[in-house]
Amino acid sequence: MNNAYDHLRLDGKHALVCGASKGIGRATAILLASRGAEVSLLARSVDSLEELAADLSAAGGTARVISADLDDRQALGEVIDDLIANAPTIQILINNSGGPPGGPLLAAETSAMEIALGRHLFCSHLLVQKLLPGMREGGYGRIINVLSTSVREPIPNLGVSNLTRASVASWAKTLSSELPPGVTINNVLPGFTDTERLGSLGAATADRLGKSVDDVRSGWIAQIPEGRLAQPEETAEAIAFLASPAAAYIRGHSIPVDGGRLKSI
Ligand SMILES: NC(=O)c1ccc[n+]([C@@H]2O[C@H](COP(=O)([O-])OP(=O)(O)OC[C@H]3O[C@@H](n4cnc5c(N)ncnc54)[C@H](OP(=O)(O)O)[C@@H]3O)[C@@H](O)[C@H]2O)c1
């Protein structure tokens, strides 16, 4: 019998989750698998991925590990071709990777911009081009990009990240009118989320401002109406929703998961 939550299920779908070894990507892979998706887990830390894949398999899911460095597009293309040769239809693509280092934009080398655009924009483009034929043929595709609230309001001292996220958001919006019916693309914009990435940003900010890490975190929390940092599982909920049949008519949009921190409408 159908129930109200069937439209969130992902049985029979295959998801490629980039940056799946830690943080938001890992939480997303776990949630997608719990909703019935087969998951392909991509990152550089193969040991962590193997451990996660074993846990997911023990829980009755199907998971495979893809060792790839998103800073090497040539190698990425080759491993994705291998994946497609074994699993031609991957309906769900989660574009997610490690954020660029902090610092003011004025001080940034163009080489840092090239690395960030390569990892976040060019890799996402390559993956869409490779996976789209399968999505089109099956009439179902969900592309979800994990960006940042900086798409709406640039964040001080994250210069390279700000420009990279804006580029990806513009790329996604453009594609949203080019992709065929049934294949959607959307962005999730995490706010302050308690992951390794936030830990290193907290340490760098504390160092820069001569404050303690606790003071930096308290300063962040003071900006959040919900009064706390997000857990990666909460961001994953938005991603899994966008990946599901329930989100079929949401296309070309950005959804913040920020506890109400953004001030813009
Ligand atoms: N946490 C936050 O508060 C927050 C807020 C706004 C936006 N974001 C953004 O959301 C995204 C995810 O954040 P997070 O906090 O989950 O980050 P995280 O904990 O640092 O995890 C990043 C993931 O990306 C993978 N990765 C990094 N560089 C890679 C590369 N060159 N090739 C392949 N995989 C790579 C990492 O795996 P390996 O190291 O194993 O490769 C890891 O699985 C990032 O872009 C981040 O900047 C985060």
Image (cartoon, rainbow, N blue to C red):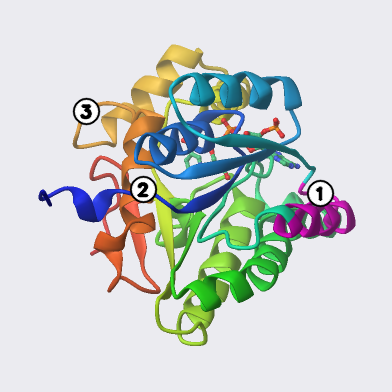
Q: Position of residue 180 (x, y in %)?
A: 47, 84
Indicate the amino acid at tag 1: Asp
Of the residues under marks 1 and 2, which one precedes in the sequence?
A: 1
Tags 1 and 2 touching, CB below 8 Å:
no
Ligand 1 resides in the quarter of the picture at top right
Task: Answer with left or right where residue 128 lies relative to residue 192.
Answer: right
What crowding class fits label 1: few (fewer than 14 Cα within 10 Å), some (14-19), or many (20 or more)?
some
Of 77 and 88, the residue lying toward us: 88
The residue where tag 2 is placed is: 240
What crowding class fits label 2: few (fewer than 14 Cα within 10 Å), some (14-19), or many (20 or more)?
many
The residue where tag 1 is placed is: 71
Viewer can see residue 170: no
Asked if ligand 1 lies within 8 A of label 1, the reply is: yes
How far apart in space, not on screen, are marks 3 and 2 (Cα)?
24 Å
How far apart in space, not on screen, are marks 3 and 1 (Cα)?
36 Å
Give the main secondary structure of the magenta stretch.
Answer: helix
Taking the spot 12% from the left edge, 52% from the top edge, the residue there is 2
Taking the spot 57% from the left edge, 74% from the top edge, the residue there is 171
What crowding class fits label 3: few (fewer than 14 Cα within 10 Å), some (14-19), or many (20 or more)?
some
Indicate the amino acid at tag 3: Gly
Of 156 and 168, the residue lying toward us: 168
How far apart in space, not on screen, are marks 1 and 2 (Cα)?
26 Å
Looking at the picture, does residue 23 appear above or below residue 245? above
Helix, strand or loop at disc 1?
loop
Front of the two marks 1 and 2: 2
Q: Which residues are magenta?
A: 70-85
Of the residues under marks 3 and 1, which one precedes in the sequence?
A: 1
Indicate the amino acid at tag 2: Ala
Is 140 contained in the magenta span?
Answer: no
The residue where tag 3 is placed is: 227
Of 66 and 191, the residue lying toward us: 66
Of 100 and 219, the residue lying toward us: 100
